[in-house]
Image (cartoon, coloured by chain):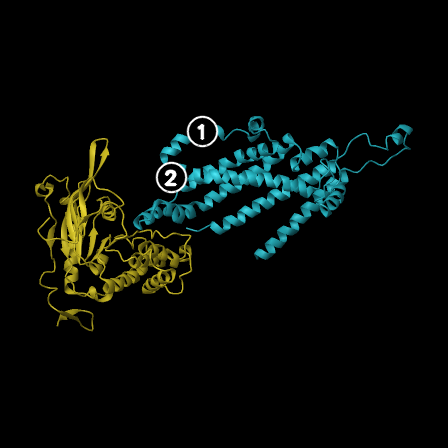
Chain colours: A cyan, B yellow
Amino acid sequence: MSNSLTFRAALLSLIFLVITLGIWEAMNQAPQKTEAMSEYELLMGGADQEARVPPPSAVLKLAYSELSNPFYDAGPNDKGIGIQLAYSLYRVLAGFFLAALIAIPLGFLIGMSPLMYKALNPFIQVLRPISPLAWMPLALFVIKDSEASSIFVIFICSIWPMLINTAFGVSNVRDDWINVARTHELTPFKTAVLVILPAAAPTILTGMRISIGIAWLVIVAAEMLVGGTGIGYYVWNEWNNLDLSSVIFSILMIGMVGMLLDLALSSISRWVEYQE
Amino acid sequence: MSSKKYFVEVDSLAKRYPSKEGELTVFENANFGIEKGEFVCIIGHSGCGKSTILNVLAGLDSATDGGVIMNGKEVSGPSLERGVIFQNYSLLPWRSALKNITFGVQARFPQWSKDKVIEHSLKFLELVGLQGVEHRKPSQLSGGMRQRVSIARAFATQPQLLLMDEPFGALDALTRGVIQEELLKIWNETHQTVFMITHDVDEAILLADRILLMTNGPYARIAESVKVSIPRPRERNTIIHHPAYYKIRNHLVDFLVSRSKELSGNNTDNEGMQSSEFKPVEVDPAEGIAAEPVQINSEGVAVPA
């Protein structure tokens, strides 16, 4: 039953894809010339006056050639898509894990101590709504390194969901479980490791999943701003080159990598999930 | 307290909460003792503070007045010497049945090897009839099985005093009966000292040596200490035919229906109960009957032996 549902869903997805690509392809064909080209047009390479979005066939052709050699490096302005994505991934993961390193212990502290929660909450409420890119000038000035600054921007945007979710998960651990720890004379450290951490783990993982999603959104914008390397820079650079096929191709790649990041975290969260 | 020294001594315990009209006294002047190896049940209407008394005994809550002394030492916090079984089982849902028990055993005997911890835990899992499901998570077990795991965990840590807060309250009547028998079986083997809260009169008579009766709150008190003189071993299907059974049962039901209100602390007629020296009246509703040996005949009726 579920098998046939999966099959039917896949079939429907395929139909939607074919229709969308078909319309896209059909609407973006160069018009047939009704009359011979003028000398000027011939001089200009027969260019159409109106620029068109490249059809899916052109994007696919480019994707094939890009993906068959993703790691070539032909100078600062011409690197393979694999290298660009690897730069972005490195920045995202570095900023994300640095944030986790701070957010999870701090979240534990806030979740376990109402005093710390009340004391730190105003800071969190003011800092959290700030667009991470607003930090960029300050980061560039203080850190004096564009690479480290973009990692900092990722750090600052991924810290909040993890911090808030960890604090929420920790403060909502059921009193019964805390009482089990107390009646078994567990030390505070053992209580944190054996009871609170596994109890709050699903909530913490949800926070991490939200964080990595935001981080992947922000890195594109950050790299457009900072330039040099990375998928965000690549998109902007191809726009400057007026290579729309590459722009569309890299948009799709951003989506694919983002999906894989989310899948990775959701499969980790399946390990720590429990049913009450 | 009296000259007699109990294993657990509860001395003029009281719990008061601040409220708009001054202070709200939930219960006060709770004086009683528990002997080693004794099974004591406490019955009372909701809101009389039974659970608070149990939590104070466990060290999870603190009383406003009075104190608890166990084995010559004052209770001032949770301890492995006092195991607790909660109504909602309080199993850790991310651990399997076996791992929930090893959790307790490891905390109790940190010097034990891993193998010994597992062996000991499996023994108690078997004692509650749960062999074969040790690797299941609590969510994959029925309510009755979960409470058995919880009982196994408490007995496996071998506390000096076992506290049970309505352990069977969330179970259906059939399951409850089966687990009561299992609890009796384990208790007959271990003679664990038990203090248990229940709402079920029949359960109390089946399990307890003594039943403490609480009056209604606020200003609740432990008014009576009823002796259950029916000899052990008891069984669920034969105990109801014992001639003492209905004497005790009627006494308990009568208390809960009428006297728990009459004797209530804010009833000004009960001057005698206002004193901190107040001790529960000791009652043996089946005095004389239980002492005589009886046999159950083929019709299930008790006859003199």
**Residue at image location 43% in from the left, 37% down from the top:** A106
**Of label 2 and label 1, which has the lower sequence position?**
2
**Measured from the top left, where is residue B47 in percent x and y?**
24, 43
**Measured from the top left, where is residue B242 in percent x and y?**
17, 65
The type of residue carrying mark 1 is Phe
Q: Is residue B18 visible?
A: yes
Viewer-side residue, B47 vs A249: A249
- Figure quadrant of the N terminus of chain A: bottom right
Q: Quadrant of residue A87?
A: top right
Pointer 1 chain = A
Q: Helix, strand, or loop for circle 2? A: helix
Question: Left or right: A237 with respect to A146?
Answer: right
Q: Is residue A252 visible?
A: no
Residue that badge 2 annotates: A112
Q: Quadrant of residue A56?
A: top right
Q: Quadrant of residue B37?
A: bottom left
Which mark, by number, is residue A73?
none
Question: Left or right: B140 with respect to A223?
Answer: left
Q: Up-down: is A128 above or below A188?
A: above
Residue that badge 1 annotates: A123
**Residue at image location 23% in from the left, 42% down from the top:** B62
